[in-house]
Amino acid sequence: MSLRALRERLHSIALNLAWTWKPEVRELLQDALPRAWEEASGNPLRALPMVRDEALGAWHQRGGNGAWLQAVERELAGDGSSPEVIYLSMEFGLHETLPIYSGGLGILSGDHLKAASDRGMSLAGVGLLYREGYFRQGVDAEGTQTATHPPIVVSDVPVSPLVDGTGAVQTVRVPIGDRVVHAAIWRVRVGRVDLWLLDTDVEENSPQDRRLTARLYGGDPRYRIEQEVLLGRGSVQLVDSILRVDDPKYHLNEGHCAFAQLERIHRRMGDNFSFEEALTAVRERTVFTTHTPVPAGNESFPADLMEVALAPLQRDLDVSWAKIHRLGAAPGDEAGLFSMTALALRTARSANGVSQLHGEVAREMWAGLWPDLEVEEVPIGAVTNGVHASTWVGPEMRALLEVHGPLSSHACERDYWGRLSEMDEEVIWEAHLEQKRRLCDLVRDRAGVELDADALVVGFARRFATYKRATLVLADLDALFQVLVQGEWPVQLVFAGKAHPADEPGQELIREVVRVSQDPRFRRRVLFLEDYDMILGRGLTQGVDVWLNTPRRPHEASGTSGMKALMNGALNCSVMDGWWDEAFAPDLGWAIEGTSGSSDEEVDLRDHATIIQLLEGEIVPLFADRCSYGVPREWVRRMRAAMMRHGASFSADRMVREYARCYGGIIAPRG
């Protein structure tokens, strides 16, 4: 084999994001690119060009490496069949090297693809390639958030263009308003499944349209509408005309991608279906997942902007605008807005929330779409979210589990997690401490601040939306001082998270956290870490002792960060909302009621008092109760119990299997 061919084979493996969660793939790349791997900060696409041909050739000649390379290639090879399910999402959080995600929705989408790959499901994702991604966060000395948008370097990210037989990049052509927008097609390999991304930064477009996929969740309503028309219409064109998938099922992940339904109706009408017949056929092959129990979070657009952007599609459908608008009319809306969630609900056979409690909330929110049904009969079910264990469980905890087989193959098996019962508390505690020490290193590198590995470390990391009440624990600084500084054991609070650049109240919460962190009383006891991303998310969920979550109930649809923390042995202290409403038991963590009170202010006061009482009366004493050789044995027993009881239940592996079981006619496993 030539050195050029060897380099191409390694490049193909580096393009497949399986190395981000499969140890056998990552170890192969690290072994082939040892020094360069470190210099490139673990990005094999940057590392490979640094290595000379002679070094690669010598590596390949060493005993067993050729067979190792072949084994990894076989592991990553798909079966070449067309996907049966198309999974649409506005964002995908797969790895920090591909920053096309903002938060929980994108991370969930990425975990869904990885779990589908692990299970061999016949699925492909479609989204947009944001050349400037979501914003990078800076925070100044006053706590003011700044946003920058550094462009990605395509050669450094795991994407490859889809080309035709002549080598030309293939494109879709999407009519939007009074022009046609061209979008190049990029492929991302996610283990054994594909993610296809549309990118308007091509020469055929005007400068304005070239920026249509520049930023995630940027711009004004017109920009957002046009992005979503591109995603919806462009994804169906890609699937039908370029990938040539025959009549797939669609899974819409949130309402952003609901315009795909109108494009699918248009294409059905080309087969001599009426509008109503086409709508019925499309509905029968669609499931919709809603993630937003906050009314303001369910995206709606002014009707006049919609009419302009959708004018070409309306002509193709040959129906009145009033008929289209009726599909997107939200119950009780007097402003004439077009609701993307309403469109998705009306055009899907099955719909679900992302926790059992969220399913209840969603049924009540959208009951007006089914005025003849009682609320409990509204056809919105629930599939509780899960997280991809192989991505989020830290190496030391993972090593304990993988004594009994690879985590990627067994994540949803209760007996697999149950084997932790065979391990001594000291072994589990030492694994946790190693992950905690690595978090200390990350905090030092990121913020130049020393995190105390001996302290009780409480983590709060999520989007700084006001309903998440990031500053609730800071409401009474005198009481907080007694807990963090004057108590029987040192306690540190670590915050991280971004507020949308247009969300001034959310940014004010960041300023408040930073102000408290600069108070001399709380030096090194309250920390804010800027530029929350997947690196920081992994570090925090793998290393903290307690995961704090304080949403205003019932506004947290699920809350997957707490699941990640649990799988790493952190104990949750959370409002009884989202997933924690299902998972809580007194021996696994702590509950904040979140509902008692006649007003939001009264609820906040009671919830804050509960947090302080739990920290002072239960959490800190339990953590401080050490045996003769320094292990908090009862604390570790709770860590182990939480992982054993819920590690499988809240895995993405369980989630994708549940979708296949509950929506078998829509989303089915391969074979």
Image (cartoon, rainbow, N blue to C red):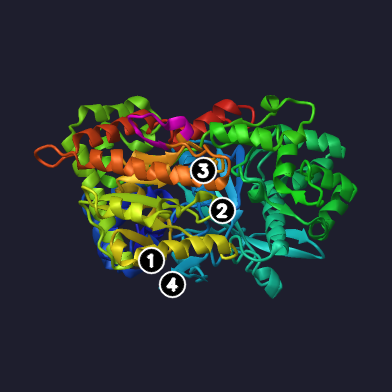
Tag 3: amino acid: Val
User: Residue 164, position in %: x, y?
Assistant: 62, 58
Q: Specify which label sits upstream in the sequence, 2 or 1.
A: 1
Q: Looking at the image, is 639 positioned above or below residue 437?
A: above
The three-letter code of the residue at mark 1 reads: Arg
Q: Secondary structure at mark 4?
A: loop
Q: Is residue 444 visible?
A: yes
Front position among marks 2 and 1:
2
Q: Dividing the image into 4 quarters, which one contains the N terminus? A: bottom left
Residue 603 is marked as 3
The quadrant in which residue 304 appears is: bottom right
Compare marks 4 and 2 and give the one earlier in the sequence. 2
Residue depicted at 33% across the width and 65% down the height? 446
Which one is closest to the eye, mark 3 or mark 2? Answer: 3
Q: Which residue is mark 4?
A: 142
Q: Earlier in the sequence, mark 4 or mark 3?
A: 4
Of 580 and 48, the residue lying toward us: 580
What's the amino acid at mark 4?
Glu
> Which span is picked out in magenta?
581-591
Residue 46 badge: 1
At label 2, which amino acid type do we have? Glu
What's the mark number on residue 407? none
The reply to whether callout 4 and callout 2 are in contact (CB within 8 Å) is no
The structure residue drawn at horizontal position 60% and vertical position 33%, both measured from the top left corner, is 359
Task: Indicate the secondary structure of the residue bearing disc 3.
Answer: helix
Q: Give the labeled residue for mark 2.
A: 91
